[in-house]
Amino acid sequence: KAGVTQTPRYLIKTRGQQVTLSCSPISGHRSVSWYQQTPGQGLQFLFEYFSETQRNKGNFPGRFSGRQFSNSRSEMNVSTLELGDSALYLCASSWTGANEQFFGPGTRLTVL
Amino acid sequence: TQLLEQSPQFLSIQEGENLTVYCNSSSVFSSLQWYRQEPGEGPVLLVTVVTGGEVKKLKRLTFQFGDARKDSSLHITAAQPGDTGLYLCAGASGSNYKLTFGKGTLLTVNP
């Protein structure tokens, strides 16, 4: 069974630009969660989607948004990038949500 | 806001030594999970503990969930260089569909 895939793996953007990251969950998993990981803050929860509905959202500004498609694939978007948005963005899928999650390798975003 | 505090933050030991990593909170969790993350990769689930007082063993790794379901520990016996990585604990609460992660313990096992 294929694991969680994330594209792209690496991304370099400049301040003010926007970016879209993609996540394909494990087949059959309907829940997709997104996290931001930085050395100082660790893994911070962004949001979780289940069957195209956002069920929970972390404490991030509105510049961070996401969506989920009918095939459970998910995208997250960050608009008006700031230097502090540089991080590893991780996607995780699971059967129902906050149970055992399977992570993708992440997208390393660098904002210059 | 639920917080999980992990200690120690960094740990560097020699091959063959034993170690314990702690994960503490003032909040009750319905379950607690442990993950290991290697550089350039996403976290990989090691174990989930659900019942207060539960102990689970995974080869040389022993996981314990506190009786009150507020804390957990990970004990590694005879550590090996392959155990090197970032160990993360994560708590799940009720039906809010999110995991709260600790900041992790970075373990280095030197040959």
Image (cartoon, coloured by chain):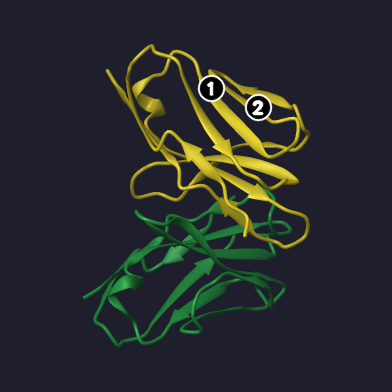
Chain colours: A green, B yellow
Give the residue type that dot 1 points to: His
The C terminus of chain A: image quadrant: bottom left
Q: Which mark is residue B64?
A: 2
Disc 1 crowd rating (10 Å Cα; few below 14, some 14-19, many 20+) is: some
Q: Nearer the viewer, residue A18 or A6?
A: A18
Q: Which mark is residue A18?
A: none
Q: Identify the residue at image location x=30%, y=88%.
A: A16
Q: Is residue A71 above or below residue B91?
A: below
Element at badge 1? strand
Residue B30, percent across and down? 75, 46
Element at badge 2? strand
Outermost left residue:
A112
Disc 2 crowd rating (10 Å Cα; few below 14, some 14-19, many 20+) is: many
Residue A32, percent across and down? 61, 65
Q: Is residue A12 above or below residue B104?
A: below
Count up the numbered dots: 2
User: Left or right: A92 with respect to A28?
Assistant: left
Q: Nearer the viewer, residue A57 or B1?
A: B1
Q: Identify the residue at image location x=46%, y=47%.
A: B103
Q: Identify the residue at image location x=34%, y=53%.
A: A39
Q: Nearer the viewer, residue A50 or A27?
A: A50
Q: Which residue is mark 1?
A: B75
The answer to whether the residue labelled 1 contacts the one labelled 2, judged by CB atoms less than 8 Å apart, is yes
Gap between marks 1 and 2, in whole Å? 9 Å
Mark 1 — on which chain does it sit? B
Residue A92, percent across and down? 56, 58
User: Left or right: A103 with respect to B16?
Assistant: right
Q: Identify the residue at image location x=74%, y=59%.
A: A96
Q: Residue B65, can we see it?
A: yes
